[in-house]
Amino acid sequence: MTIRYDPTEKPPLQPVMSASLNPIHSDINGYNTERLLKNTISKSLRQFDESLVISLSSGIDSTLSLALIRKVFPKHKITAICGIFGGDQNESKQAKKIAKAFDADFKEVQMSSIFKHMPQIISISKKPRWNTYTHLIAKEAKKYGDVIVTGDGADEVFGGYTFRYAKFLNLLHPKDNWKTKTINYLECHNRDWVPDQEQLFDKSMKFNWDSIYRYFRPYFSNRLKPLQQIMLADFNGKLLHDFIPTGKAICQHYKLIGYSAFLDYFVINYGLALPTDQKYNQKTQLGKLTLRKIAKRIGVEHIQQKKGFSPDLWFDWKNYGKKICETYLLNRDSKIYREKIINPNWVVRTFEKVNDDGDIRYLNRLISVLALEIWYNIFITKDMMGDEIL
């Protein structure tokens, strides 16, 4: 409920050590990285001689993945699927052009409300998470093949979180210790928590920020440069404990094989050890520079700053979410209040704040609290079915 994942759980991949980010390679034009990516694509996907499916936005990760797969397998049937949310979050026009350029069939999936189908989202991941709406992409993918390709890991390995880097470096002071750096790093993830986070929980939970900070000490108490420390925290944090496990759970549910070339062992080890100035340009604030070199060389057109598969939360809130949250969270008999997990007074105040101020951070927290209530009803009290529509 504070950093969106459990850092004590064993991740699907081995965490990387700080030494892994020491710059021992150089690949200014991306030739070595391209070779590694092609090698893993050939090795991992050659056994699937039928249809491949790719989750396609119009950003560089999925676009480059499609382009390289087509180069390695010029005759494979490829189906590209793009998710469309309500509001203005639509990359399908550009994605369709990209699919056509690389001879892939193109399918659109209308992404339904995260609120209405939250029981299904949570039952698949088995966690109180609401950001697993990409399961609809996987559900559609199963119609066309058994392998779904994503761009997972590209941001963490090749430096894609430019907004986070810029903000962290602006907050940085030369004598900052690991705790100050951790606080600044979490400020760069401030949609995962709110300033009055302590009041969100019931007093019996004994929430303490220091217990959160300690999980991050290994990432910021080392000899790496600040930008490398952020990348270490990004890789060992949400990627290993949230994104990959969530994707794995979704693939298992739909009996799919999930694949990303950027998560290949050799690609990870090579990419992490590239100099940071071959990943991120502080002046232009462009990231994934090595991947951009490859894309330009092989004629891949992608948008510079993509939105990705992300819902317009305000659109969804106004149309569905507010009423659903009121039903479950303004009911003092809800499980999370009866079990003294969440403070109901905080929830009431937050409703007012969201309605009056339109604060996206507090809206995110309300959705997370709703997800916890739904999870409790499905897995603990079993008062709700996973396929129930709210």
Image: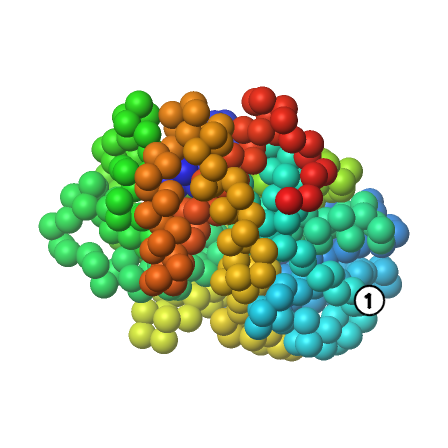
Q: Position of residue 172 (x, y in %)?
A: 20, 57
Q: Is residue 258 left or right of residue 140?
A: left
Number of numbered callouts drawn? 1
Residue found at the very far left of the displayed protein: 175
Residue at 59 percent of width and 46 percent of height: 132
For the N terminus, the quadrant is top left
Residue at 72 percent of width and 46 percent of height: 44
111 or 4: nearer the viewer: 111
Q: Is residue 316 left or right of residue 42?
A: left
Compared with 342, 52 (above or below) is below
Q: Amino acid at mark 1?
A: Asp
Q: Position of residue 174 (x, y in %)?
A: 13, 55
Q: Is residue 36 visible?
A: no
Q: Position of residue 214 (x, y in %)?
A: 27, 32
Q: Is residue 340 visible?
A: yes
Compared with 64, 13 (above or below) is above
Residue at 85 percent of width and 60 percent of height: 77
Q: Which residue is mark 1?
A: 105
384 or 29: nearer the viewer: 384
60 or 84: nearer the viewer: 84
Q: Is residue 300 left or right of residue 346?
A: right
363 or 238: nearer the viewer: 363
Secondary element at image label 1:
strand
Q: Position of residue 13 (x, y in %)?
A: 54, 35
Q: Residues within 10 Å of mark 1 (few under 14, many from 20)?
A: some
